[in-house]
Amino acid sequence: MGVLEFLGIRDRAGGARAAARDDDLFDDEFQRKLEYLAMVSKRVFSGAMRAERRTKKTGSGIEFADHRDYAPGDDIRYLDWHAFQRFDRLLIRLYEEEEDLSIYFILDTSSSMGFGEGQKLRQAKRLAAALAYVGLANLDRIAIVTATDEISGRMPTTRGKARIFRIFRFLSGVKADGETDLGEAMKTFVAQHKRKGLAVLLSDLYDPEGFERGINVLRFNRFEPYVIHLVDPRDGRPDVRGDVRVYDCETGAEREVTVTAKVLEKYQHAYDGYLDEVQRFCTTRQVSYFRADVDASFDELILRVFRRGGFLR
Amino acid sequence: MHFVGVPLATLLQVGALAGAVVVVFYILKLRRRPVAVPFEKIWERILRDKEATSLFSQLKRLFSLLLQLALLALLLLALGDPRPAANILEGRSIVVLVDASASMKAIDVAPTRIDAAKEEVKRLVRGLSGTDRMLVAQMDAAITPLSTMTSEIPDLEAAVAAIRPTDARVDFPRALRFAADTLHKLSSPEIIVVSDGALGTSLAEAASVDLGNVRLSYVPIGTRSKNVAITSFSVRRYPLDKARYEVMLEVTNTNDEPADVEISLLGDGQLTDLTNLRLGPKERLPRFYPNLSGASKNLEAKIALAGNVQDDLPADDRAFALLPERRRARIQVVTTGNMFLEAALLLDEYLEVTAVHPSRYPAAGAFDVTIFDGVTPNVAPGSGSLFYLNPNGENVPFKVGKTIEDTDPQVRLGFDELDEKHPILRHTILSDVNVARARVLEGDKEDKVIGKSHKGALLIAGRRAGVKFVALGMDVRETDFALRISWPMFVLNVINDFVEEDVQYISSFRTGSVWQIPASSAAETATLTLPDASTTTVPIKDGRAVFLGQHAGFYELSTGPGETGSFAANLVDASESDITPTKDLVVGRHAAGAVGEFKVGVRREMWIYLLAAVLAVTAIEWLTYHRRVTV
């Protein structure tokens, strides 16, 4: 499966299903752009392998970091002879060790992500694929998990740009099904992943138990959460009129309502309020937050919004 | 309240069924449509406040159901066509008699009285109540119903539009009789006369009409009566000089003030004479134009007020006449010789006389008149009308009785009884004619006895199979009749009577009467061309076409190719020219009242308002539903 096929642009049916606005979204030109982008994090994590990321560790990198007194057993290759001549002390040169970064893509695959025409899940999968590609290109360690009220799927950690197709295959098999409980799912996630890193949460955050729980679990377990909030404008402006019985597509919870213009207006206010609430929560807790509109241009989203927000450089 | 549409019992049944259906549909509608949402919690947030108003929501649902039930109830009521009880009782049967006589052409009311009358009737029609029924009829010389007795407004309006004024006088008794007969045994009968009240003598004649309990109402039309009219117009040729003619014209001033009038006489459209004269108040002035000559055939008289001022009725300012046609009458005289007869025939140069001996009868050719002098042979075809002098009793269309003689010196033989108004006795005096010997004549029942002695009829006239005859039961040579001036007049009168060359002042017909127009007796119908160039087929009976003429002008009657004759018709009616409108109408003991109870624009059919209410409620339901006030 190629990149374009994954994105539905050049499928075997001739690309008929591809939306016009998605044309050339992830073509070769766009791939080249992605390769120049590096994923950055505000924090530096320790890594198991050398990569292109600076860590707190001093090690065998090439960039000088500090001196310390020589202790028996230290590699004498790192003795700073110039310092010895000037200060008559044996000092060991310390270098910043460049390590790889663990990036976890946590993809919400609850039923609400597939609501309507499934555009939220589709957009989330594309974003995950694109960001994963960027990570792989920067020799980062990429892992993808799918979450509902549990960790329903997992793609083990992988490195190297050549593994992107594995990621694509994994993402292709992801379907939206199940209830959302990010709190429980994240508890499972942190228990399974001891190595800390970036936790990119791609979700609509429709969590009946509260969207805060899942994010807090990540924060409290020293992961750096990046929240990519998938937003479908149609969720905020439902095409519903009259006497209806609304039911939750995940929980099946029902509620009778007579939808009038006034009720619709109230609903839109409530929906916008919910989005603001999520953003406010993330901002106050210094959690990176990006609102990804499913109707927004994918190119625009990747190349401008994320970059402006410091997600890419 | 009464239901004149669908009966109440049926309405209740239908209402119960339809109401049940509405309720069932409403309950079905209350089953809410399931709609999936991505996150129900957001709905929960907004509905926290909403639940507090659920009672109001329930009420709105109930209101919606009530609206729909109200719609159903209104529709059913409309189907029932409810009427107030008072309205049922008020249903009237009305005959509207619209005067379409010549006086209604007066223009004192703009544009004309007839148009004003039509407007009044339209107003009545629009003001009819739901149960009222009306018939619109035009009254002139005849009575013409223009609609049925109906409550349909469009039909009645079409009837009003069909009213056309005529040049005839109105036959009010006939119209009143028609209206009374129409309203016989109908509820709340009413006759509404829409007229200027210028009904002439017919108003007095109408007093004999029994109106019973029929209410009589009157809508007066017209404001003033400034009119001068031609009330008589005739032309005749002189009997003995048919190249010349004289015209008699009568003008009448119907005003209470004197009027200066200009009279124009036109022959074939060319001005022949122009006269100015002054008419006193209500004055009728006859005027003669003697010794006129010329080739004119169509004569027309016009009058106008001095100063080129038009009077209120232009219709009677013109009159038409047709000069009797000049032609030589072909006379066949079957005689052995009668000097007196031959001398009399010599007096008229327009007679083409052929004398034939009885043994040579018939002479060659066709004749207008055949005179049998003392002989009665079998009548040959082409003999025309028959004039028997001293018939002997054979081959005659009447019985010839015994010979009577003047033997009693106390009671001389002669004409003891004479029909002096008969045309053949015009300008003659026969009452003192001495007769030595005569024969009594006995005709059929329909024959006319014109002269009669104490011993029996001596002069009779009649018609057999369309052929006219006159018989004189004496030899004029045995009387002193032949010595008198009356003799040639009598002979010429008989011939003129036969050949229809009327020397009386009847050169035009009078509108509004049944005309008997001379025509070929061989034809059964004739084509009559009216002054407006339209044609109609009229029947011919006994050699006369019968037609009720109502318009003035020149007419043409045709019974076939080459058999076309013309004649004129005039209003010439002094009573009709008196267009003084009357404000009150009194027919015998009945004084007509004013019309009432006609309120324009107020329809009493409630179903219209019910349907309007249905539309209004539907609009409210539609608006409130789409604005989600109701559900």
Image: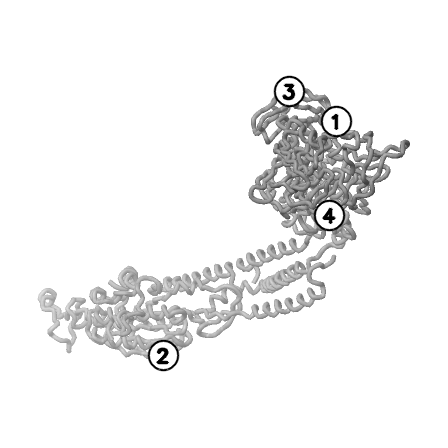
Query: Outermost residue, right direction?
Result: B410
- Asked whether the beta carbons under mark 1 and mark 3 sit within 8 Å of each other, the answer is no
What kind of residue is marked 4? Ile
Could one spot residue A60 in this view of the protein?
A: yes
The chain holding disc 4 is B
- Residue B587 position within the rendered picture, expressed as x and y whole percent measured from the top left: 79, 39
Q: Which mark is residue B276?
A: 3
Q: CA distance from mark 2 to mark 1?
A: 150 Å
Q: Residues within 10 Å of mark 3 (few under 14, many from 20)?
A: some
Q: Residue B456 appears at what percent x and percent y?
A: 84, 40
Q: Are marks 4 and 3 on the same chain?
A: yes
Q: CA distance from mark 4 to mark 1?
A: 64 Å
Name the residue carrying label 2: A152
> Is there CB contact under 8 Å for labels 4 and 2?
no
Residue tagged 1: B485
Which mark is first along the chain, 3 or 4?
Answer: 4
Q: How is the image coloured?
A: one colour
Q: Which residue is mark 4?
A: B94
Instruction: Give the amino acid type for the residue marked by disc 1 in the picture.
Output: Ile
State yes or no: discs 4 and 3 in contact (Cβ < 8 Å): no
C-alpha gap between disc 2 and disc 3: 126 Å
- At mark 1, the secondary structure is loop
Chain of the residue on which disc 3 is drawn: B
